[in-house]
Image: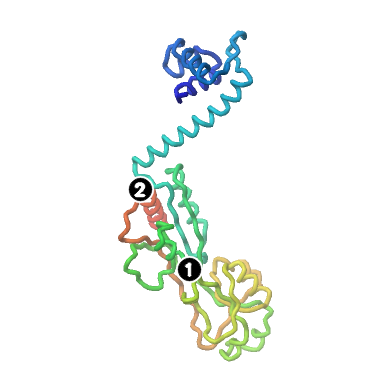
Amino acid sequence: MTLDQLKSLQAIVEGGSLREAAAKMHRSQPTISVAIKNLEDELGLKIFDRDQYRNKLTPEGQALYEQAKLVLGQAQSLKNLAAKLVKGEELEVGIAFTSAIPVAPIISTIKKCKNEFPSTRLEIYSENGMGPLDLLDSGRVSLVIIPWIKNIEKLQSMPFLTLKFASVIAADSPLLKQYEVVPKAVIKKYPQVLISEPTASSPTYGALEGGDQWRANDYQTNKEIIIQGMGWGYLPLHLIKEELEQGLLVPIKVEGNLEPTPVEFRIARLESEPVGPVAQRLWELFREGVQND
């Protein structure tokens, strides 16, 4: 059995006749007919009912045709894979970003890359804090978007966005009625709502040392905990815009705590690692997006 025989079978069924199959495959009708006859002889079954005016599949032929389509599809996938490997395109490219940032501009850029490289699988990870760096170091992703707390020499980076945070509390909190600026001794008894970091050794942004704490692994949960009066904490402004406007959350000032400073987020990749064409194009698309903002 050969792929050519299966292609001949498919061409006859889908074209409706030997003539159409021969035209599609750029072969003579006798050549197509011989290919099918040899296939029947090899398999020991009758594929077409030749007593009919048109080439009609027998029940056995119909079952064979359905399976032939699967085999031919798999063969085409292998050819596509081989062509992609010859060009050097990656089978998959991963990107990881810190969960605090807006997702829409990231996904829109990834979509553009996927449209250009439809056969490359794109893996997307949302991690807390500096968690994306672990995925980069392990080779699971090619690009990360992380808070740029300090320069990291092993990384090549470019700006992505600057994010503002605010320290907030539920609008009906009794602390707001008692204090304009909450003393540290008081606020330490009131739970601070924080993001869980990927490792115990990772520093937590804005953590009040020695105070009571709640920890959750996503900002939406943290926001809900604070709205329900179970604590206070730092949240990205873009996530709480509506709640501030509706009066569900209000800013809170804590003794000795400076106003949260804007945090710069950068797109980064390992400077020493070779980059494939898909990862390189994704990098370029992010750079184009930043330049157009």
Quadrant of the rendered structure where residue 263 is?
bottom left
Could you say which disc has been placed on residue 12 in the image? Answer: none
Q: Is residue 7 above or below residue 249?
A: above
State which mark lies toward you, 1 or 2. Answer: 2
Instruction: Say which of 4 and 238 sits in front.
Output: 4
- Residue in the image at 32% along x and 54% along y: 274
The answer for how far apart the CA atoms under marks 1 and 2 are is 30 Å
- Residue in the image at 53% along x and 28% along y: 69
- Tell me which amino acid carries mark 2: Pro
Task: Give the residue number, with chain letter if any, for mark 2.
Answer: 277
Q: Is residue 82 above or below residue 68?
A: below
Question: Is residue 188 left or right of 5 when viewed as pictured?
Answer: right
Q: Where residue 141 sits: x, y (%)? A: 43, 57
Instruction: Say which of 215 and 183 sits in front.
Output: 215
Q: Is residue 24 above or below residue 112?
A: above
Task: Give the residue number, with chain letter if any, for mark 1.
Answer: 163
Instruction: Say which of 205 and 72 sits in front.
Output: 72
Secondary structure of the residue carrying tag 1 is: strand
- Tell me which amino acid carries mark 1: Leu
Q: How many marks?
A: 2
- Residue in the image at 38% along x and 38% along y: 82
Quadrant of the rendered structure where residue 181 is?
bottom right
Q: Is residue 44 above or below residue 89?
A: above
Q: Where residue 212 sits: x, y (%)? A: 60, 83
Could you tell which of marks 1 and 2 lies nearer the N-terminus? 1
Q: Where residue 171 sits: x, y (%)? A: 66, 77
Question: Tag 2: Cα neighbours inside 10 Å, few (<14), some, or many (≥20)?
Answer: some
- Residue in the image at 60% along x and 22% along y: 62
Q: Where residue 28 sits: x, y (%)? A: 43, 12
1 and 2 marks in contact (CB < 8 Å) = no
Quadrant in the picture for the C terminus: bottom left
Secondary structure of the residue carrying tag 2 is: helix
